Amino acid sequence: MLPATAKWYDRRDSVFIEFCVADSKDVKVNFDKTKCGFSCLCGTDNVKHENQIELFEAIDENESKHKRTDRSVLCYLRKAQPGKAWPRLTKEKAKLSWLSVDFNNWKDWEDDSDEEMGNFDQFSDMMNNMGGDDGMPDLDGANEVRFFFCFFFHFALLCNL
């Protein structure tokens, strides 16, 4: 069993973790108040990946979600204390070889603007039209809409759309 390579970044109300696993199957993501667990089978060889993360701070496990794509699994962890910066993902300061900061998506909070939310309706409509029955909630609530907007925004950045 190998840990999956992962990247993370911090936002005002949430933390994102992207597990870089192409062609994953049997994906399992467990959110606990202070932990995040991830496992999957990957590739044609069915290599098993497993990660257990003791988080820097508590999360709202009921509002945290994940989304699988062909290239990765993106996890949205809703902070229990929004507005509090996380200087690192893990409780311990130890450097983990499989974990790195996603500097492409990192953003200083001082630079926050309403610009990201400017196309909010456009992106939420697009996400509503994407369909799929993967257990993700409908976009009825503000938190779900924000999650999908952030997911699509970051997906677009990764794909250079």
Image (cartoon, rainbow, N blue to C red):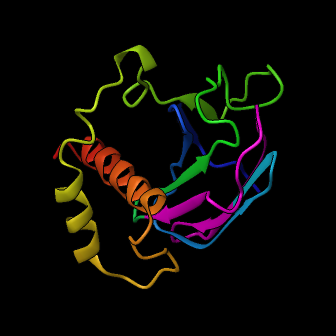
Residue farthest to the front? 141
Q: Report whether 145 appears left or right of 54.
A: left
State left or right for residue 26 relative to residue 57.
Answer: left
Q: For residue 33: magenta? A: no
- 146 lies above or below 154: below
Query: Can residue 42 be seen here?
Result: yes
Q: Say which residue appears at 68% left-offset and 36% top-offset.
A: 81
Measured as percent of width and height from the top left, residue 74 is found at 50, 54
Instruction: Identify the residue at the far bottom of this view.
Output: 133
Name the residue located 59 percent from the left edge and 43 percent from the top edge.
5
Q: Say which quarter of the image contains residue 124.
A: bottom left
Q: Quadrant of the N terminus?
A: bottom right
Left/right of residue 76 with respect to residue 124 in the rendered view: right
Percent of width and height locating residue 14 = 56, 41
For this orientation, the residue located farthest to the top is: 110
Question: Which residue is at 27% across, 32% downward?
Answer: 114
83 and 40: which one is in front? 83
Q: Locate residue 64, reporting x and y percent.
A: 61, 57
Q: Where does the magenta region start and end?
A: 39-68
Q: Does residue 62 show up magenta in the picture?
A: yes
Is residue 48 at least partly visible in the picture?
no
Across and down, in percent, residue 50 comes to 73, 56
The mark tally for this picture is 0
Q: Looking at the image, which residue is at 16% across and 47% down?
A: 161
